[in-house]
Amino acid sequence: MKLSARGAVEPFHAMDVLAEATKRRAAGRPVISMAVGQPVHPAPHAAREAARRALDVGRIGYTDALGLLSLRSAIADFYQRRHGVTVDPARIAITTGSSAGFNLAFLALFDAGDRVAIARPGYPAYRNILAALGIETVEIEVNAENGFTLTPEALEAAASLHGRIDGVLLASPANPTGTVTGRANLAALSAYCRDNGIAFISDEIYHGLTFVGEEATALQFGEDAVIINSFSKYYCMTGWRIGWMVLPTALARPVERIAQSLYISAPELSQIAAEAALGAEAELNVYRDAYRVNRDFLVKRLPEIGFSIASPMDGAFYAYVDVSRFTNDSMAFARRMLAETDVAATPGIDFDPRDGDHTMRFSYAGAFEEMSEAVDRLARWLA
């Protein structure tokens, strides 16, 4: 049997670690998983109640490919309320999680052989999806010198080295670094892309989880950026697989055509729940405050046990740490750590294929008691 080269992309190591942790837990091991960005909290009460009512009615079916108009209108209201930006609901597409949003954006914007710039370290699925589609990834190192974010200067340097850049993908807050790209930097990047005819995709799935700095949407600097957001993180709805895109007007119909064939529509039950979740900020902000407590704890404790903080922890819910004191093979270290301590975390090689052998990412989206117990286990193990 001939296999497509598309399946030869790198594995998403965080998911592999999660699978092993789940297997160990099923065998009765006291596993604490800090491997994936999975909020410990349930979906908001209003979302669960809305879904329950819909199930009682019993008819859950297809929606328009772009999603329920009521949900798209509610998201438009959200942007007006939160950011003071007017968005036509016709520019909003509801997606099967942000993952489908990235697929749709890449397919609608780029052809095989185009080049898309992303940050390194950065979310591995960007690189893997682009590779599967035959799109070249240009990884730009982000560090303390450039504020752990992409800049016009870095894009200029990358273009001189690799050739024309066709697209830029930036996450703020970022995974795994926790970087929050400030308003001025985001405006400069948006303007640079517009002036140079470069497609700009702004990954905003961790909006609502900013602890330090100013949270801005690229929509505040023009209507030509593609915005990708999700109900998975702030709204605690990972398994509901529901997200959204805000599109330039000219891109709405191409995305709709592709979505019709790839997905038909996002699950109607999840769309109904998501619309209710948009009104649950008071409940969700309590959850966010719990992540802040976890964050402050890990900022102090991880360096005390030998894991120095490698990047800002200004947003999202990840600690990206340097473990070079203990290893130069983060994948082997992650496996051994899980086997010997029952604590799961993600090897840095997932996020940085060049320098990630000496880094790890710890998710602090869990319960504080688990964070504390995990650090105690690691402290004993490392000692």
Image (cartoon, rainbow, N blue to C red):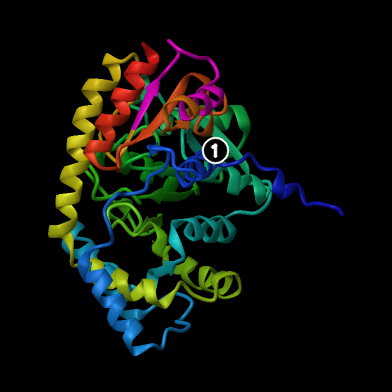
In the image, is residue 49 part of the stretch drawn in magenta? no
Q: Which residue is mark 1?
A: 13
x 53%, y 40%: residue: 20
Q: Residue furthest front?
A: 28
Q: Amino acid at mark 1?
A: His
Question: Seen in the image, is 275 located left or right of residue 327?
Answer: left
Q: Is residue 51 above or below residue 280?
A: below
x 56%, y 23%: residue: 332
Q: Quadrant of residue 258?
A: bottom right
Query: Which x, y percent locates residue 108?
Result: 56, 61
The part of the chain drawn in magenta is 319-338
Q: Nearer the viewer, residue 70 or 197?
A: 70
Q: Residue furthest right?
A: 1
Q: Is residue 43 above or below residue 161?
A: below
Query: Which x, y percent locates residue 137?
Result: 59, 39
Query: Which x, y percent locates residue 204?
Result: 34, 50
Q: Is residue 212 visible?
A: no
Please state the total of marks drawn on the protein image.
1
Q: Nearer the viewer, residue 87 or 260?
A: 260
Q: Quadrant of residue 85?
A: bottom left
